[in-house]
């Protein structure tokens, strides 16, 4: 039997939950205003299902969107946003795109998923010049789910999603150390010309050219 100290690691933090909820509501309202679909993803979806809340030791919010329906309006809506400003853009508009919103306290990551064929999607994960990722069975439909008295959209079959990302037995029990998916594969490595456009850093809506170029040059 776990000790009380061990159990405390996985108790819900009410203040943290309120803080995360504020960010999630703000994101949802902006995306709803431009009539785009999204879904809670990865650890955020797992927190909803397993904890009925936020995973206590997480520091970010994960959402998924359809990369094949990407609209640059999404980026422009958050570039100068006061609550969730765009901080990093990964990938290209039509290739392995990801956006990180928010500051160092808590960030919200949008992973754009891409259709591989009629049955599967690619869920990208960026690691310097490499694009890694997980192959997911296609999300056939989205459903409404409640978290802290707010409605969000999720895959209608979250168990299928968890099995694809974490494995059949990899998601059912809390683990203090966040682990990457056991199914992570190398999808591609950016060519040097691609890499020069595949990551951009921002602060308060301003493109950080010097910081971006320094990062890019470190991995050429």
Image: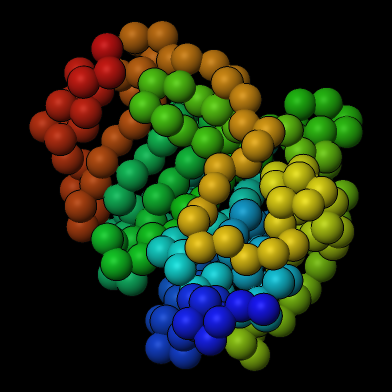
**Which percent across, then down, holds residue 83?**
33, 71
**Which percent across, then down, holds residue 43?**
59, 59
**Between residues 102 and 61, which one lies in front from this camera angle?**
61
User: Would you say 118 lies left or right of 132 here?
Assistant: right
Which quadrant holds residue 134?
top right
Residue at the spot 71% in from the left edge and 72% down from the top edge: 50
Q: Is residue 152 visible?
A: no
Residue at the spot 48% in from the left edge and 82% down from the top edge: 5
User: Would you say 197 lies left or right of 93 here?
Assistant: left
**Between residues 106 and 73, which one lies in front from this camera angle?**
106
Eyeballing the image, is 145 above or below 220?
below
**Which percent across, then down, holds residue 128?**
37, 27
Visual colour scheme:
rainbow
**Between residues 213 and 79, which one lies in front from this camera angle?**
213
Which quadrant holds residue 181?
top right
Eyeballing the image, is 215 above or below 153?
above
Q: Is residue 176 visible?
A: yes
User: Would you say 20 lies left or right of 206 here?
Assistant: right
Eyeballing the image, is 169 above or below 83?
above
Q: Quadrant of the C terminus?
A: top left
**Which percent across, then down, holds residue 33?**
56, 68
């Amino acid at each position: 039997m776990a000790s009380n100290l061990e159990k405390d690691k996985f108790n819900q933090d009410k203040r943290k939950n309120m803080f995360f909820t504020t960010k999630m509501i703000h994101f949802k309202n902006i995306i709803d205003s431009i009539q785009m679909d999204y879904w809670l993803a990865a650890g955020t979806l797992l927190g909803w299902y397993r904890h009925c809340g936020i995973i206590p030791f997480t520091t970010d919010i994960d959402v998924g969107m359809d990369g094949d329906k990407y609209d640059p309006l999404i980026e422009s809506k958050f570039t100068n946003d006061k609550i969730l400003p765009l901080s990093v853009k990964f990938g290209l508009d039509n290739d392995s795109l990801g956006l990180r919103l928010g500051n160092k306290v808590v960030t919200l990551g949008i992973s754009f998923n891409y259709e591989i064929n009629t049955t599967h999607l690619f869920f990208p994960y960026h690691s310097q010049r490499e694009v890694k990722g997980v192959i997911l069975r296609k999300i056939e439909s989205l459903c409404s789910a409640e978290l802290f008295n707010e409605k969000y959209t999720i895959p209608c079959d979250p168990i299928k999603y968890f099995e694809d990302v974490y494995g059949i037995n990899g998601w059912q029990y809390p683990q203090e150390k966040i682990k990457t998916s056991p199914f992570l594969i190398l999808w591609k490595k950016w060519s040097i010309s691609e890499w020069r456009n595949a990551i951009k850093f921002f602060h308060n809506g301003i493109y950080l050219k010097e910081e971006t170029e320094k990062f890019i040059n470190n991995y050429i």
